[in-house]
Amino acid sequence: MYRHLLVPIDDSDLSVHAIGNAVALARQLGARITFFHALADADASLRGEAEVLRATAPSEYDYAFAGKARELLAKAQAAARALGVPCEARHVVSDKPAQAIIAAARAASCDLIFMASHGHGGKLGMLFSSETLAVLMNAGLPVLVSAIGEPAVPARAIGIIRDEHRSLAAVMHAWMHALAGARQAQAAADPELMQAIVRYVQEFPVRLHHPKEEEHLFHALRERTASCNAELDELERQHARDAQLVAALERRVEQLAGADAAGRVAATRALEEEVKSYAQFLWDHLGREEGVILPAAQRHLTAEDWERIDAAFLENRDPQFSGQTDREYRQLFSRIVNLLPA
């Protein structure tokens, strides 16, 4: 029986589904996962353009050639943690993805490589079609290829919602990790970083994600069936409660920032306890949505409903940081998830 899976990931929509499939398999097997991303060699791939970007926009350069990998891997780890699957993440710089995948699998002592086979999106997206054979022929260990086609509209919309959940979960894990590190060092947390994290939680889930769920997903489901009304009512109450809890966390962070050196240590301990409580609230909330509401929506909503939901969530693809959500949130998210253990 396989005990350790290597799962290569990229930044395509299809990779979201591949991660879900890999996590489900690992959970069934009782296995652990190493998520892996082969980062393009910036100088080799962009030549002079890389140097221009490095000189004129260093933060954009850092994100494009390092921050993006951290973002992808943090969200993949969040998906695994949500189902209790042990995981770690690795990335390397390589313009030969197949070789990099094989080397990573051997270095991590994996006994199975789980790959998606498709030909869409990004440098690793191409590997999932043209280089899959190279991995199969040269890996020297079992390779499971999960064939994934272009997702239908319902699957794409659900993928966006789940990916946004993973984005929030990654931030919460980073927050708890930072606070636990401060406690272990008997030190205070960085007030500026705590302010950045609480601002992210305010702006994305509370002011953007939750309202769109209610306006589009919940509203459509209420129109098609009354069987979920009680659960939807509870989730909407939780959305309101979420805003209250985040406001309380903001006050805790303000207390931390305004305290003297000794007071900051005590304020950090108090903040950690409140963040832990908030995280448990979130895990329950996200579990209800993914375990009850999304399956019900798949049963009851029409193709037209899904078209509207898909269009609404495509407008604020926070985890991909495209469209109107630009560099400020991209940089903020990368800074936060970079706190996660390598």
Image: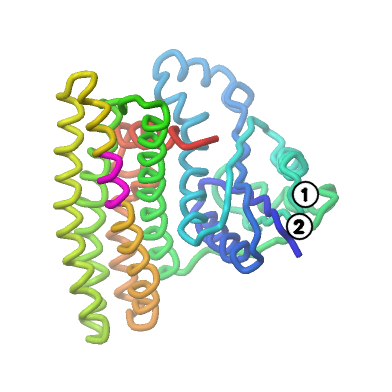
Q: Are marks 1 and 2 in contact (CB under 8 Å)?
A: yes
Pinpoint residue 327: horizontal percent, then vertical percent.
33, 32
User: Of residues 266 and 118, which is closer to you in this image?
Assistant: 266
Residue 188 left/right relative to 5: left
User: Of residues 334 and 137, which is closer to you in this image?
Assistant: 334
| Residue at screen point 40% across, 45% down | 173
Q: Magenta region: which residues?
A: 271-278
* Residue 111 magenta-highlighted: no
Label 1 SS? helix
User: Of residues 95 and 211, which is closer to you in this image?
Assistant: 211
| Residue labelled with disc 1 | 135
How would you classify the magenta stretch by its main secondary structure? helix
Label 2 SS? strand
- 10 Å crowding of disc 2: few (<14), some (14-19), many (20+): some
User: Of residues 298 and 270, which is closer to you in this image?
Assistant: 270
Q: Distance between the residues labelled 1 and 2?
A: 8 Å
| Residue at screen point 73% across, 52% down | 132
Q: Assign the C terminus to one quadrant of the image.
A: top right
| Residue labelled with disc 2 | 143
| Residue at screen point 41% across, 55% down | 163
Residue 116 left/right relative to 336: right
Q: Earlier in the sequence, mark 1 or mark 2?
A: 1
Task: Give the amino acid type for the residue marked by disc 2 in the picture.
Answer: Val
- Position of residue 251 relative to residue 285, above or below, is above
